[in-house]
Image (cartoon, rainbow, N blue to C red):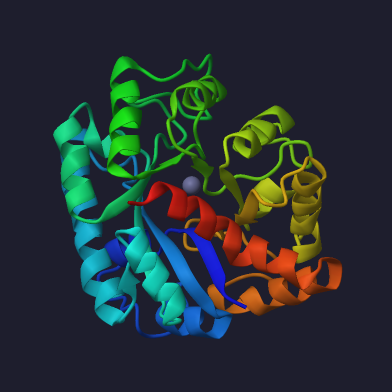
Amino acid sequence: MRIFDAHCDALLKLWRHPDLTFTETDERLQVSLPEMEKGKIGLQVFASFVPYDVPVTNRYAALLEMVQLFHEKIVGSGLKPIYANQDLAQCVLKKEKGAILFVEGAHPIDENLNYLHTLHRLGVRGMGLTWNFRNSVADGSHEPNPGGLSLFGRQVLAEMNRLGMMVDVSHLAEPGFWDVVELAEAPFIASHSNARAICDHPRNLSDEQIRAIIKKGGVMGLSFVDFFVTSEKRTVWIDDLLRHLDHVCALGGSEHVAFSSDFDGTAVTFGDLKRAGDYPLLVDALCKRYKEAEVQKFLCENWLRVFRNVLQ
Ligand SMILES: [Zn+2]
């Protein structure tokens, strides 16, 4: 079975630790070429996230360094960069490993639309509008009294739709989410967000939000971060994650739910799902509960459909 995972932070680790290679197994890296091979991952989204401890004036430069690392270390290790629908189709047909470059949080672009255009030219094909905090586009999930999309944020959304970039609402506060629902001209995704009805966390989506994603033809990716899966203080297992999947399916979302590990973006993982190479354990668990055609949708087809709809 082909696996498509729509969020990992391996680029952040590669940026923080210049000695890391992507081609060798390393304890510090949950997603690497050997781990992808072991996990049978065919398509992987690589998010570039500039940490907030980077001074404001250096953030765009730091982002460009991560973009460079994507090309140098990830594409350089043989993964096919996905820029267009045609690349996606070829990748699937030839069973090649594909890599899609995203930005997590628009804070490095400040208020400069040219920065967004440059990123698109450099191969970025998706962006999370915010991380946890406020930026010039919108407010993040952890802001008190959050507002929706700014005027600049509306321009960013329109440009992303025009350029065929994936709009990602994970980390976005609710007012901004509803603005995207109203204004977006293409389906959008929540690349790594779980169900709030199962685990009440501001990063997770309410049933109303999940229904809106379904209605708009989008997809949400369930993440393997333990505190998004359960609020109980204990070791989390694949079975706990599948409660989120069951819930989204019960809301009518079986065509709109998939997986996004968030590996390398979190130190806290499951008892059983700890690295990209552990994906077969998830596949086995899914096959015990769901029909094969459905499992294929969760693991790949749902992401493929929405990326096909958005990429040009
Ligand atoms: Zn994130």
Q: Nearer the viewer, residue 40 or 292?
A: 292
Quadrant in which residue 290 is drawn = bottom right
Residue at the location (45% across, 85% down)?
34
Q: Is residue 198 left or right of residue 101?
A: right
Which quarter shows the N terminus?
bottom right
Quadrant in which residue 208 is drawn = top right
Q: Which percent across, then down, holds residue 15?
A: 28, 62
Q: Residue 294: in sight, yes or no?
A: yes
Quadrant in which residue 268 is drawn = bottom right
Residue at the location (15% across, 45% down)?
118
Q: Nearer the viewer, residue 130 or 264?
A: 130
Q: Which percent across, then down, holds residue 75?
A: 27, 73
Residue at the location (49% across, 78% down)?
36
Q: Residue 30: in sight, yes or no?
A: no
The vertical placement of 49 against 209, above or below, is: below
Q: Which percent across, then down, holds residue 205?
A: 65, 35
Q: Nearer the viewer, residue 91 or 39?
A: 91
Q: Is residue 87 left or right of residue 292?
A: left
Q: Which percent across, then down, holds residue 148?
A: 46, 18
Q: Is residue 252 left or right of residue 145?
A: right
